[in-house]
Amino acid sequence: LKWYACGPTVYDATHLGHARTYVTLDLVRRAATAYGGSRVDFAMGVTDVDDKIINRARELGLEPLELARREEANFFEDLDRLGCLRPDRVLRVSEHVDDIVAYVGDIVDRGFGYATEGGDVWFDVGKLGDAYGAFAEGRGTSKAAAQAALEAEDKASISTKKRDGRDFALWKGAKAGEISWDSPWGAGRPGWHIECSAMTRATFGDALDLHAGGVDLAFPHHENEIAQWRGASGDLEGVWCPCWLHTGHLHIEGRKMSKSLKNFVTVRELL
């Protein structure tokens, strides 16, 4: 069973909302192994290159990858204390940049991506027509929620160069003082959504059996992963991954536990 789970963006402490997701996945993994007779090959992605990491490292006076390694170690120590099995494979973005560049190149070569001034590369969502958004709608994401997520992502991208507000970054051109790698489009770093697509292809090939993550990732993250697979493969009707597992939110006093709302309890505070 080729199983990939979206893991943490390692810039701060693990809270109970994160713990709920990974404990749930651990229970399913154990059940699949013990009762389903499956040989599970479980890979978890770790986002160790991201705006949040860069900004947090700057606040602390650390190098971004130094902060990422520290918080990744803390994350897995927290999972150990919760009794979760460790992944069979840990896939770090910083160790798969060549795979990511190759994946972006495939998308661009097939006409589903385009570069803009400054070294940014975008996915051309309009090329997918009505197929874009179908996955999230089938998973119960309302049109209003999807629109809100798109608007938030469009605002965060801070770009007037995109052809469509729904277009998302595949590659971000380098900014002064930030970590970067060479690419055919100039120095830069990966966009968020492309990371999982490229790392899973490098690890498992062109198809997955099971993909998992929090329900908030269904749109736009998982929708965009599917879009990227279609763009890279040219297959607009096939199925990249037949099974998806989304875990629900943990609520506290009627609201989703999250760092942005500052209503979270860390695993270390609890234990």
Image (tube, rainbow, N blue to C red):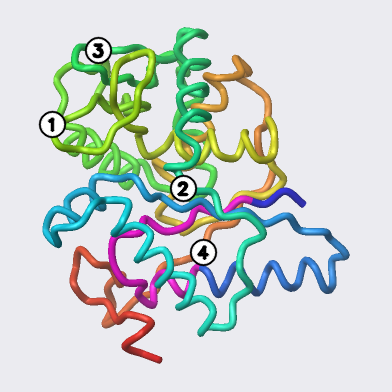
Residue 224 at x, y percent in the picture: 45, 34
- Verify whether residue 17 appears in magenta: yes
Residue lying at 40% horizontally and 55% vertically, measured from the top left: 216
Q: Nearer the viewer, mark 3 or mark 1?
A: 1
The residue sitting at 41% across, 68% down in the picture is 249
- Residue 116: percent from left, percent from top: 24, 12
Of circles 4 and 1, the one toward us is 1
Tell which circle, 2 or 3, labels the residue nearer the N-terminal end.
Answer: 3
Identify whether 136 is placed above or below 170.
below
Depth check: give the residue in front, 112 or 237. Answer: 112
- The answer to whether the residue labelled 2 contacts the one labelled 3, judged by CB atoms less than 8 Å apart, is no
- Viewer-side label of 2, 3: 3
**Mark 4 / mark 2, whichever is N-terminal:** 2
The residues bearing labels 4 and 1 have C-alpha atoms spaced at a distance of: 38 Å
Q: Quadrant of residue 268?
A: bottom left
Inter-mark Cα distance, 3 to 1: 18 Å
- Mark number, residue 247: 4
Label 2, residues with CA under 10 Å away: few <14, some 14-19, many ≥20: many
Residue behind mark 2 = 218
x then y, percent, for residue 88 = 67, 59
Residue 168 in sight from this viewpoint: no
Q: Residues within 10 Å of mark 1 (few under 14, many from 20)?
A: few
The image's mark for residue 207 is none
